[in-house]
């Protein structure tokens, strides 16, 4: 995003060398540049504005230590501020219930089914859990096949009912089956749509009511920029989800969507997808994403 952030900041503050303080005028100039760069990284306008105003406030009045340049100081302030805006700490899944029911939601193509497989693998291999997957996407028969393939790849069973076209009944039966067969995590994949519509929202809300999930993870493609924020808001209004999964961060996106989504819906980002393979899943670290956004 900032090809030479440090250079840019140092140039903007050259005039301050030896003065020890960051002045209002210089900070304002620099923040304008930073705001532009944030918008380029798909951070939404309101978030970028709030961020730069906060950084400006913090920077003003800070004494510039002789050991670091004003540019370095400002970079540090921005890094800290971005990290705290994105939640500060790692936010883990709550797996305390037995079984823990996890509902996966999002639009078609966001990477839901892929993430469902990745999560099963992560919980089994890294957390020592015994997950069951539930194939709830009845509109795309290929999605059931896809989940079965992923399940067998990662060694996790998949509950399916190819005779049913009722996603609510399937989800409920899947959870019952999981309980009966002693699985301590049940992950329910759901149908998506190409765009948000009333039918999708009504249906997924009904699936939530029927399964009473402990975690609802909203999966969104990080490359969709501003759309990602709007979609997140629409899903959160209806589902009150517990966390966000940002997929496709292996592309050349800077990850500005992470900051916008967190500030618009105020829900933690819990995982990021970094590829198509089952192991391409990472827990979300706010400090690492801050460095990525700052380039
Ligand atoms: P769904 O419709 O939401 O279930 O989406 P899918 O799981 O079928 O994923 C849609 C496409 O995105 C597939 O081709 C996946 O391989 C791909 N995909 C999913 N997650 C990632 C990711 O983190 N990185 C990349 N590069 N591709 C991904």
Image: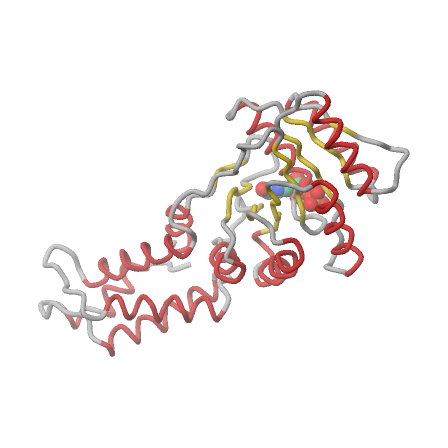
Rendered view: 109 above or below 33: above
Q: Name which quarter of the figure residue 280 lies in.
A: top right
Q: Name which quarter of the figure residue 16 lies in.
A: bottom left
Instruction: From the viewer's perspective, tell me whether residue 79 is left or right of residue 118.
Output: left
Rendered view: 263 above or below 146: below
**Quarter that holds the N terminus:** bottom left
Residue 115 image offset from top left, x and y in percent: 62, 38
Q: Say which of 97 and 222 sits in front.
A: 97
Rendered view: 284 above or below 159: below
Q: Say which of 270 and 144 sits in front.
A: 270
Instruction: From the viewer's perspective, tell me whether residue 287 is left or right of residue 118.
Output: left
Residue 22 image offset from top left, x and y in percent: 19, 70
Residue 96 image offset from top left, x and y in percent: 53, 32
Rendered view: 215 above or below 203: above
Residue at position x 76%, y 49% in the image: 206
Residue at position x 77%, y 39% in the image: 136
Instruction: From the viewer's perspective, tell me whether residue 129 is left or right of residue 41.
Output: right
Q: Residue furthest right?
A: 163
Q: Say which of 200 and 113 sits in front.
A: 200
Q: Name which quarter of the figure residue 228 lies in.
A: bottom right
Way the structure is coloured: secondary structure
Which quadrant of the picture is home to ligand 1? Answer: top right
**Quarter that holds the C terminus:** bottom left
């Amino acid at each position: 995003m900032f090809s030479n952030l440090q250079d840019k900041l140092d140039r903007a503050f050259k005039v301050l060398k030896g003065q020890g303080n960051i002045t209002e005028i210089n900070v304002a100039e620099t923040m304008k540049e930073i705001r532009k760069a944030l918008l380029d990284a798909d951070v939404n306008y309101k978030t970028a504005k709030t961020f730069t105003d906060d950084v400006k406030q913090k920077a003003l009045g800070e004494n510039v230590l002789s050991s670091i340049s004003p540019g370095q100081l400002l970079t540090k302030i921005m890094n800290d501020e971005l990290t705290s805006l994105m939640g500060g700490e790692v936010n883990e899944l709550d797996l305390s219930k037995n079984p823990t029911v996890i509902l996966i939601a999002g639009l078609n193509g966001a990477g839901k089914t892929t993430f469902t497989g990745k999560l099963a693998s992560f919980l089994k291999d890294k957390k020592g859990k015994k997950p069951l997957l539930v194939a709830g996407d009845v509109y795309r028969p290929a999605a059931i096949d896809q989940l079965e393939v992923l399940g067998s790849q990662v060694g996790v069973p998949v509950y399916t009912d190819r005779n049913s076209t009722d996603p609510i009944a399937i989800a409920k039966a899947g959870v019952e089956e999981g309980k009966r067969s002693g699985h301590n995590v049940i992950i329910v994949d759901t149908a998506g749509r190409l765009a948000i519509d009333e039918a999708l929202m009504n249906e997924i809300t009904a699936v939530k009511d029927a399964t009473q999930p402990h975690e609802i993870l909203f999966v969104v493609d990080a490359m969709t920029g501003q759309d990602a924020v709007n979609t997140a808001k629409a899903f959160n209004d209806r589902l009150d989800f517990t966390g966000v999964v940002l997929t496709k961060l292996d592309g050349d996106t800077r990850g500005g969507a992470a900051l916008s989504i967190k500030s618009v819906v105020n829900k933690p980002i819990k995982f990021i997808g970094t590829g198509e393979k089952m192991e391409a899943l990472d827990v979300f670290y706010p400090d690492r994403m801050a460095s990525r956004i700052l380039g």
